[in-house]
Amino acid sequence: MYTLEEEQVIDTSLQRAWDFIRDPQNLNRITPEDMQFEVLQDLPPEMYEGLLIKYRVRIPFFGKQIWVSELKHIQHKRSFVDEQRVGPYKFWYHYHEITEVDEGVKFTDRVSYQMPFGILGKWVHHFLVKRLLQQIFTYRREALEKIFSST
């Protein structure tokens, strides 16, 4: 099992932060373009417990993959989880949290995941996946800074 944790403080209000993250359509705004992220369904304007989101995403060296996430454990103005139901990982559990702090709002992401394919999956993680996930979260950090500084 691997864990990736990222924290970021943004100068915004808790309400503005929640308004952004509760809208599943905003996922596209914080996903790198080279991943060719494509939602394959109509999305509601606000997430709800049990919402399944089906999308296609490009993974380097593996091509386009279908990914289905279930949104769960939603705590209003606090946190939620997206858990992979179908996708490239053996296990993917992504906890999102926002917390009011003196400087604004702290965004916390904690991803617990397992690679498929045993020892081959460990090798692919070491040489590719770990770096790709860091790049995705770096992109998200920059995207959130731009989004909240422009509104």
Image: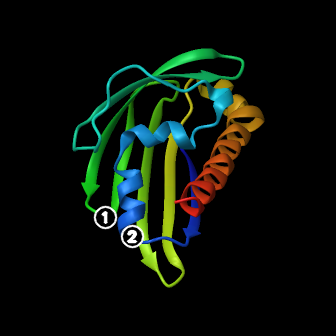
In the depicted structure, whether residue 8 falls above or below residue 84: below
The residue type indicated by label 1 comes to: Lys
Where is residue 55 drawn, in percent x and y?
Answer: 44, 23
Q: Where is residue 2 in the image (x, y as percent from the top left)?
A: 57, 46
Q: Looking at the image, which is closer to me, 146 or 61?
A: 146
Give the residue number, with chain letter if any, for mark 2: 14
Identify the residue at image location x=52%, y=24%. 88
**20 and 114: which one is in front?**
20
Q: Nearest the camera: 11 or 32?
A: 11
- Could one spot residue 70 in this view of the protein? yes
52 sits left or right of 114 in the view: left
The numbered mark, 1 or 2, whose residue comes first in the sequence reads 2
65 left or right, relative to 22: right
Q: Are marks 1 and 2 in contact (CB under 8 Å)?
A: yes
Give the image location of residue 132, x and y in percent. Answer: 70, 37
Please report the residue visible at 40 percent of the width from the left and 19 percent of the height from the top.
40
- Asked whether 14 or 93 is in front, the reply is 14
Amino acid at pointer 2: Leu
Task: Return the residue at label 1.
Answer: 77
**Location of residue 126 (image quadrant):** top right
